[in-house]
Image: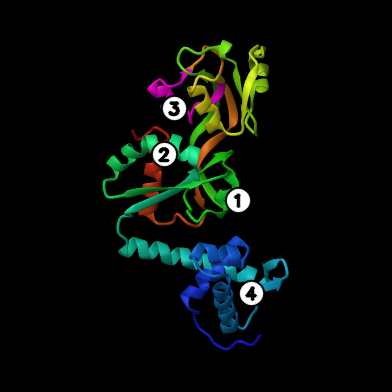
Amino acid sequence: MRKTRIGLPPLDWLRVFEAAGRLGGFSAAAREFGLTQAAVSQRIGNLEAWLGRALFVRGPRGVTLTVEGESYLPLVQESLSALARSTEDLFGTAPTELRVAGLASHIEALVLPRAAAFLAAHPGVRLMSDSAARRAGLDEERTWLQIRFGRGAWHGREALLIAPEILAPMAAPGQGWDAGIIDLRGERPGWRDWARLTGAMPEAQARLSVDSMGHALAAAEQGIGVALGSLPLARAALGAGRLCLLDAPRLPTRDGYWLTWPSDRLTARRQRALVEGLLAVLSGEGG
């Protein structure tokens, strides 16, 4: 491939190249920019012709960066970030919108009860939420600011803790162990882990088995039984008296709820301040 031009390539081509290199493919870059895969391929082809170098190796299973592409990518990323920061600092105005994505149950339990406090603290900002049907869908979600559950380590993302996950037996008012227990399937610690902590397994049988914490809490509110519920997710229900904690030990875990974003995304001071304001509210520090 011969070099046909010198100087700075068009910014649009560089942005598409950066996204394809960062996300590992043309399809992912197309989703980020709302383009077709063919349009992304054309822009990168134009950039390669401009530079006179191949930046990607095309294969039947996708694309990979060439040696030149791997060397060029961090330079482009640093330059785009510096340009974005300088533009924002010189000409930017205060953000008027903040969009956050997460599982529907996390948006409902963590964001909505605190939305009024955030909006009161930021009267010129509109808060928007996007619900993901499942956790794996967050990797494909175009909304870059996300609430995630885990241990705070996601490749290429920064994360700030909203709340550590703590589990505790809880039920509807007036309900006790005689109502039975609700079994929650999945990765969270369960009743057997709680029994190892307390030294005694609940004698009540599990008459209902669910696959999400949101369903377990909803079932407990309906008086179906005792749930080993998430204190962060049950905060509103406990405060409103729809759920009550049993006089029983709590079970700390290694997981938590985090506010996360791509490491190279939150560079403008005003935008970061807005995100930190949302974190303060979600974590209970801002009202």
Magenta span of residues:
227-244
Find disc 4 in the rendering and name its residue.
Answer: 55
Q: Residue furthest right?
A: 60
- Whether tag 2 and tag 3 are in contact, CB under 8 A, the answer is no
How many residues crowd around disc 3 within 10 Å: few (fewer than 14), some, or many (20 or more)?
A: some
Nearer to the camera, 132 or 286: 132
N-terminal-most mark, 2 or 3: 2
Disc number at residue 111? 2
Find disc 3 in the rendering and name its residue.
Answer: 235
Q: Specify whether 190 is left or right of 144.
A: right
N-terminal-most mark, 2 or 4: 4
C-alpha distance separating marks 2 and 4: 42 Å
Find disc 1 in the rendering and name its residue.
Answer: 155
Nearer to the camera, 283 or 60: 60
Query: At label 3, which amino acid type do we have?
Result: Arg
Q: Secondary structure at mark 1?
A: loop
Nearer to the camera, 196 or 37: 37
The percent coordinates of residue 177 (x first, y second) are: 57, 12
Q: Specify whether 186 is left or right of 81.
A: right
N-terminal-most mark, 1 or 2: 2
Q: Secondary structure at mark 4?
A: loop
Residue shown at 46%/21% (left/top)?
243
N-terminal-most mark, 4 or 3: 4
Q: Is residue 234 magenta?
A: yes
Query: At label 4, which amino acid type do we have?
Result: Leu
